[in-house]
Image: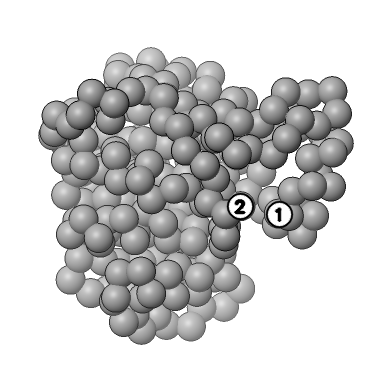
């Protein structure tokens, strides 16, 4: 059995490649995750000069994703998956669901305060969310607006990760799907962990980059109140 770097009732965090770790874990109710993106349609221009994470070269390790190398691991981890991704991956998620006889739906996150127009391209104010499932964990009927396939909100202002998601957006899917155990194979800065623990749900996170494990540790301690004692990880 593979050992987590941190384990406490309700939360486990692992350091490493999720392909090495997922086969050792039991199925979760919901995979709620934000894998690295493919940004084939972005050529920089004004966006590279204006966006802090581009200027700091912090998108280089998250903007290239070999979907085929991961999809079997992700599909086996749960009967229900909600994954954030770029436009270039819509085809791959839909095809993967179709080939496996799974149900598929596409939602969008409309960012009210996205980066302004750049040279000769469209505004980057849409992010896509694929839902793939054979069985949903549950279903909780909420207000009609909560069940929209379009979510509108601002980007996080003080983001600690380039792809950090708003807490209410993640909360929406956990609550409506009524998932009790949430798995995030690409933990990043730990937003999903924060939401899961605030909702008193079980959480399992996996992250390859030790820098973001440290960030997630501080966020969980600050925003949830858990005093984590993570083993120091090497780059």
Let me know if residue 21 appears in the view.
no
The mark found on residue 7 in the picture is none
- Quick check: 13 above or below 188? below
The mark that comes first in sequence, 2 or 1, is 1
**Left or right: residue 7 compared with residue 209:** left
- At mark 2, the secondary structure is loop
Could you say where residue 168 lies in the image, as x and y percent from the top left?
Answer: 35, 46
Q: How is the image coloured?
A: one colour
> How many angstroms separate mark 2 from mark 1 (CA)?
6 Å
- SS at mark 1? helix
The front one of 110 and 216 is 110
* x 52%, y 42%: residue: 154
Residue 220 image position (x, y, % from top left)? 37, 70
In the rendered image, which quarter contains the N terminus?
bottom left
From what the image shows, is residue 34 above or below residue 99?
Answer: below
Viewed as shown, does residue 235 lie left or right of 109?
right
Disc 2 + disc 1, Cβ < 8 Å: yes
The residue tagged 2 is 162
At horizontal 53% and vertical 66% (from top left) the residue drawn is 212
Residue 72: % across, % down: 40, 36
Q: The C terminus appears in which quarter of the rendering? A: bottom right
Asked whether residue 170 is in view, the answer is yes
Q: Which corner quadrant of the image does residue 144 belong to?
A: top left
Task: Decide: few, some or many residues near mark 1? Use Cα within 10 Å; few <14, some 14-19, many ≥20.
Answer: some
Q: Is residue 202 above or below residue 7?
A: above
Query: Which is more toward the observer, 58 or 14?
Result: 58
User: Quadrant of residue 82 in the image?
Assistant: top left
Label 2 crowd (10 A; few <14 / some 14-19 / many >=20): some
| Image mark count | 2
Looking at the rendered structure, which numbered label has been put on residue 53? 1
Residue 193 lies in quadrant: bottom left
């Amino acid at each position: 059995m593979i050992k987590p770097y941190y384990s406490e009732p309700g939360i486990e965090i692992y350091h490493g490649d999720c392909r090495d770790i997922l086969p050792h874990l039991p199925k979760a109710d919901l995979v709620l995750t934000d894998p690295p993106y493919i940004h084939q349609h972005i050529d920089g221009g004004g966006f590279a000069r204006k966006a802090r994470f581009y200027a700091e070269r912090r998108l280089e390790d998250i903007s290239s994703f070999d979907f085929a190398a991961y999809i079997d691991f992700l599909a086996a981890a749960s009967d229900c998956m909600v994954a954030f991704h770029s436009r270039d991956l819509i085809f791959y998620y839909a095809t993967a669901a179709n080939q496996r006889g799974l149900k598929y739906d596409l939602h969008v996150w409309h960012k009210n305060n996205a980066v302004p127009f750049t040279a000769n391209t469209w505004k980057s104010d849409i992010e896509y969310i694929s839902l793939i499932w054979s069985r949903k964990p549950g279903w909780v009927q909420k207000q009609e607006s909560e069940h929209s396939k379009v979510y509108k909100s601002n980007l996080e202002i003080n983001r600690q990760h380039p792809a950090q998601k708003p807490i209410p957006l993640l909360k929406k899917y956990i609550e409506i799907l009524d998932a009790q155990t949430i798995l995030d194979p690409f933990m990043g800065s730990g937003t999903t962990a924060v939401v899961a623990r605030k909702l008193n749900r079980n959480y399992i996170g996996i992250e390859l980059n030790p820098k973001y494990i440290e960030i997630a540790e501080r966020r969980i301690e600050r925003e949830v109140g858990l005093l984590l004692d993570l083993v120091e990880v090497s780059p």
